[in-house]
Image: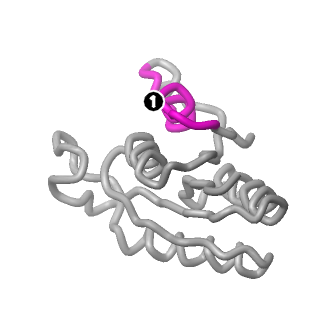
Amino acid sequence: MKTIVVGYDGSEASERALGRAGDLAAAFGSNVILTSVSSVMTGASHGGGSVDPTDPPEAHEALLESARKTLADRGVEAETVLAMGDPADAILELAEQRTADLIVVGTREPGFFERVLGHSVSESVQRHAHCDVLIVH
């Protein structure tokens, strides 16, 4: 297992995913790429459009730096990549670009609208990934 991409948003579920990815990277000597995805305004296409002011890229950069330090404290070095757009699409695109062997994401109990509309990042990632996916509960 050479490359692991980790989707990280600072939630409890992503903290658990980060920990699991760190364990795997330490055991296999894997490269870790951490990504956090800043939203764009509704109606904007992936990679373009206006940044959602309620979800600024600076907040995601701080999250990524914190996650990188957490892994470094465990002896695991990680690269950080800030992405823009839909979280599932951005994670999948990064994994494709870097020919990842594994994507690690957290999951939580979906809310009513997520269940009705099927908007789960982890479900979308596992459905469309071209590599293995570890969904950490």
Residue that carries the numbered disc 1 in the rendered image:
119
Quadrant assignment, res 26: bottom right
- Quadrant where the C terminus lies? top right
Q: Nearer the viewer, residue 23 or 118?
A: 23
Q: Nearer the viewer, residue 24 or 64?
A: 24
Quadrant assignment, res 102: top right
Measuring from the top left, give residue 19's x and y in whole percent. 76, 60
Q: Which kind of residue does numbered mark 1 sit on?
A: His
Measuring from the top left, give residue 48's x and y in whole percent. 17, 53
Q: Is residue 46 magenta?
A: no
Q: In percent of the image, x 51 and y 33: which residue is there?
A: 130
Q: In percent of the image, x 84 and y 61: which residue is there?
A: 27
- Residue 88 appearing in the image: yes
Q: Locate residue 42 relative to residue 99 in the image: left or right.
A: left
| Placement of 10 over or under 119, stated as above or below | below
The part of the chain drawn in magenta is: 117-132
Q: Nearer the viewer, residue 2 or 64?
A: 2
Q: In percent of the image, x 55 and y 77: which residue is there?
A: 65
